[in-house]
Amino acid sequence: MIVKNVFDVAKSAMSAQMVRLNTVSSNMANAQTVSDTKEGAYRPLRPVFETVYGDQMGQAGRDGLSTTRVREVVTLDREPVRAYRPDHPMADEEGFVYESVVNTDEEMVEMLEASRQYQNVLETVSTLRTLMARTVKMGQ
Amino acid sequence: MACKDRTNQQKGSRMTDTFRDHLSVFSTSLSLREQRGAMLASNIANAATPGFKARDMDFQSVLASEVGAGPMAVSDARHFATGTPGGAQTGYRVPVNPSLDGNTVELAVEQMEFAENSLRYQTSLTLLNRRISGLMQAMKGE
């Protein structure tokens, strides 16, 4: 990805925050899901952000431009809760099901932060866009 | 005739130089403000990236070296600007409250710097517009 101007910065940063919001909604949707095996239980997803610099060298460039992107989405290795529910249709022969471990409070914090970051980047880029538009009208 | 043309040309180039000098500080300031705005926007975009170090420029000294008013004037493209090596006075921000993940972006600080920078950009733009309309008025002779 090439970062040439502030719009490229906003584009990548906002899509990264969007991925973060998507993982939050996936986690929230799977907050109470159960599985018949330990391996099959849902594990929360988290994106990993990394910085992309504006120049080609992959380090702090002189133009000062940098943005963020999602390097990967990792699954948090949290041990599923083994609950004894023999009446559950998915219970194993011993009567246990495996519940996913999603901390909803944590997800809410993640969601709020991602949404704030998204708004910040949007606000920044719209301010710069207004300034650019005014500059185009210079001398009229 | 050719000689006269050349003197006219010289006069013309001297005049554009005058115009350029008349507008140069504000136009340089405007482009530097834009550059700084993009830099601060990059910091804001990286507010959640672990290990990111916020960057900023020393506006005063960059402007001074751009207009050749630094400790040593830069009057040729082959001259090195004084100050930090490389000429671009870009540095890393010292955080007020460092965070555990190594990220030095503090949103409040960046937002305030960004707001100030935008305001100063607009100021430069207004002053530049005034200068242009002043020149237009002088040309029209109204």
Image (spheres, coloured by chain):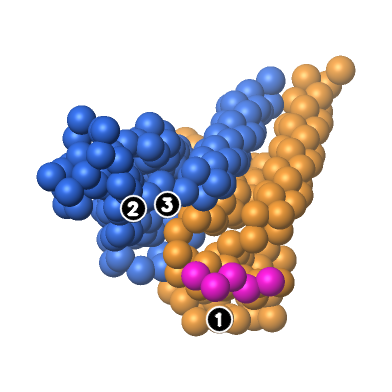
Chain colours: A blue, B orange
Q: Nearer the viewer, residue B36 or A93?
A: A93
* In the image, residue B54 above or below residue B85: above
Q: Which residue matches tag 1?
A: B84
Q: Are the residues at dot 2 and dot 1 in contact (C-beta closer than 8 Å)?
A: no
Q: Position of residue B89 (x, y in %)?
A: 57, 72
Residue at mark 3 to residue at mark 2: CA–CA distance: 38 Å
Give me the disc on residue A67: 3
Q: Is residue A53 above or below residue B127?
A: below
Q: Chain of mark 1?
A: B
Instruction: Residue under label 2, please give it.
Output: A81
Which amino acid is tagged 1?
A: Thr
| Chain under disc 3 | A
Q: Which residues are magenta?
A: B97-101
User: Are the residues under badges 3 and 2 in a single subunit?
Assistant: yes
State whether residue B53 appears in this view. Answer: no
Against A129, residue B105 (above or below) is: below
Whole-percent x, y for residue B46 in the image: 49, 55
Which quadrant: the C terminus of chain B? Answer: top right
Q: Is residue A33 above or below residue B133?
A: below
* Amino acid type of the residue that numbered disc 3 sits on in the rendered structure: Thr
The residue at 25%/39% (across/down) is: A86
Q: Nearer the viewer, residue B55 or B17?
A: B55
Q: Which of label 2 and label 1 is nearer to you?
A: 2
Q: CA distance from mark 2 to mark 1?
A: 57 Å
Which residue is at 69% across, 20% downward? A140
What secondary structure do most residues of the magenta stretch adopt? loop
Label 1 or label 3, whichever lies nearer to me, is 3
